[in-house]
Image (tube, helix red, strand yellow):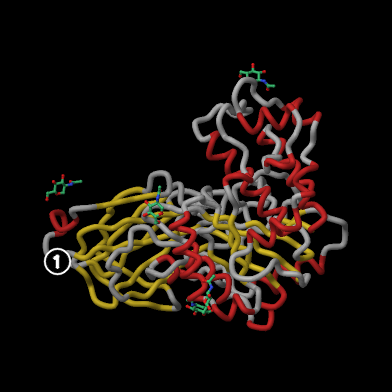
């Protein structure tokens, strides 16, 4: 982790800036958001409505900024709100989370659980969590809103959890886009731009601060307090503070950013009971165990890696192992991986002194490549031998910190 890596997130935004972001997103889209029939009368909006003959250009947009969006406000916010009326009370912070239907994977419920669990009960009244169901599939909207209603009755009655939706008519046609990017995701991106504009606009006056999040992040405990305290230390005017590197554009003051990431385990090994040891400097909430347990979390060192640094799993009972997967770095911190390192199995444990295991009868199992290593068919190499210690050992210095995202150990049957 270094402070100046990728800085392309606007996460915490003072409410005043929200509207200008809406405008910027509309520029990105290169189309006007003016799509509600009665408000669009010009030739320009005709173009948008029918998306046919001529493409709508950036110049068209500049000639006719999106003033219509603001005049839409009153009723649409009420209509967009699923459980209550549009909330009126101004709070400290709004967390805005757009989510769409994903076949197979659904993260949003866990994300909400993590947001709520990591907020102290009395602070729930200081925040709004606005979930934007940004998909037009009515079955899905119905289903997920029922489940939210059922899972969080209290949060809904506090108005802390606000669930919203939009309609196709709010969105411009996404045919005939003339894009600044040349990529196959342009339609998806454009939809996402409008989604962001929609949620920004919805949240515009709800709170003093707004933070945009993705639907698959987990938070550190007590994040509202951390954010509040951080804001109170700011001694100069700011537009945006960065608490993460979530993926939407906007360049701002780079500040601390280690609060949000995808912490889910991917490989989920059998991981028999073990103790974890390392000589690396541990960041308090990113313990060595976090890399090994199946629950969300990872290990994160707080110093650059040096040749000879080690991270060791000592099984409570020696194990016959078939397969091991090591994954380092994370989605938000992809460079914090072990670039040069090897995995070593030891058949014997001599002692553990001052949290340093002494293991012997070592066998090198392989070198990490791109921060990753998978070794299979171990029983064909090790036969009936059992492994007592597994050590990751750095074979070179590196100028970045280390995240060990997952150690998955699959035992032989
Ligand atoms: C639209 O795209 C075409 C082809 O990429 C480009 O030549 C043209 O300048 C674009 N028009 C605008 C207004 O951006
Ligand atoms: C809630 O947080 C506590 C500690 O802050 C943790 O032990 C517990 O596992 C969390 N529960 C969920 C469902 O995330
Ligand atoms: C809408 O969502 C439901 C439930 O998630 C799914 O079964 C159905 O296939 C979806 N319909 C379309 C057209 O994608
Ligand atoms: C939410 O659940 C309550 C019962 O807890 C029910 O009265 C209400 O109609 C539900 N609302 C929606 C929109 O499903
Ligand atoms: C592992 O063993 C299986 C057969 O047991 C074989 O098909 C596979 O190719 C082996 N994989 C490696 C990486 O050697």
Q: Which residue is mark 1?
A: 413
Question: Which corner quadrant of the image does residue 75 belong to?
Answer: bottom right
Residue 142 placement (x, y as % from top left): 47, 62
Task: Report whether residue 327 is seen.
Answer: yes
Residue 333 vs 157, above or below: the answer is: above
Residue 333 placement (x, y as % from top left): 55, 52
Q: Nearer the viewer, residue 330 or 106?
A: 106
- The residue at the point 52 percent across, 65 percent down is 111
- The residue at the point 55 percent across, 71 percent down is 285
Give the side of residue 120 with respect to residue 254, left or right: left
Q: From the image, which quarter does the C terminus lie in?
A: bottom left
Q: From the image, which quarter does the N terminus lie in?
A: bottom right
- Local secondary structure at mark 1: loop
Q: Nearer the viewer, residue 178 or 246?
A: 178
Circle 1 Cα neighbour tier, 10 Å, few/some/many (<14 / 14–19 / ≥20): few
Give the side of residue 302 with respect to residue 239, left or right: left
- The residue at the point 57 percent across, 51 percent down is 400
- Ligand 5 has an atom within 8 Å of the beta carbon of the residue at disc 1: no
Residue 295 placement (x, y as % from top left): 41, 70
Query: Total number of numbered labels?
Result: 1
């Amino acid at each position: 982790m270094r402070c100046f890596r990728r800085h392309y997130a606007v996460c915490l935004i003072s409410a005043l800036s929200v509207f200008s972001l809406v405008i910027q997103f509309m520029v990105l889209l290169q189309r006007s958001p003016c799509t509600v029939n009665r408000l669009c009368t010009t030739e320009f909006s005709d173009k948008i409505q029918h998306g046919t003959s001529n493409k709508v250009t950036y110049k068209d947009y500049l000639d006719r900024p999106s003033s219509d969006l603001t005049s839409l406000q009153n009723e649409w916010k009420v209509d967009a709100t699923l459980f209550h009326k549009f909330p009126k009370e101004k709070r400290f912070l709004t967390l805005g989370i757009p989510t769409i239907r994903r076949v197979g994977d659904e993260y949003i419920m866990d994300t909400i659980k993590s947001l709520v669990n990591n907020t102290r009960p009395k602070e729930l009244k200081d925040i709004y969590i606005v979930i934007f169901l940004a998909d037009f599939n009515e079955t899905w909207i119905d289903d997920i809103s029922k489940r939210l209603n059922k899972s969080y009755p209290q949060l809904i009655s506090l108005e802390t959890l606000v669930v919203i939706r939009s309609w196709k008519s709010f969105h411009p046609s996404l045919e005939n886009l003339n894009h600044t990017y040349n990529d196959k995701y342009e339609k998806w991106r454009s939809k996402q731009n409008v989604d962001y504009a929609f949620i920004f606009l919805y949240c515009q006056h709800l709170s003093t601060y707004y933070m945009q999040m993705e639907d698959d992040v987990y938070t550190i405990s007590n994040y509202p307090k951390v954010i509040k305290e951080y804001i109170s230390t700011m001694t100069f005017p700011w537009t945006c503070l960065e608490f993460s590197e979530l993926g939407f554009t906007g360049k701002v003051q780079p500040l601390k950013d280690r609060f949000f990431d995808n912490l889910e385990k991917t490989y989920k090994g059998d991981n028999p009971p073990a103790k974890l040891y390392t000589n690396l400097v541990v960041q308090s909430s990113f313990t060595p165990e976090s890399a090994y347990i199946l629950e969300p979390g990872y290990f994160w060192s707080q110093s650059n890696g040096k040749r000879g640094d080690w991270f060791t799993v000592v099984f409570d009972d020696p194990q016959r192992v078939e397969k091991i997967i090591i994954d380092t770095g994370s989605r938000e911190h992809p460079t914090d991986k072990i670039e040069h390192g090897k995995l070593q199995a030891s058949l014997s444990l001599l002692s553990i002194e001052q949290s340093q295991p002494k293991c012997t009868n070592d066998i090198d199992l392989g070198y990490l490549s791109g921060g990753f290593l998978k070794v299979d068919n171990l029983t064909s190499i090790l036969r009936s031998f059992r492994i007592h210690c597994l050590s990751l050992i750095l074979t070179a210095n590196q100028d970045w910190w280390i995240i060990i995202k997952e150690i998955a150990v699959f035992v032989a049957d």
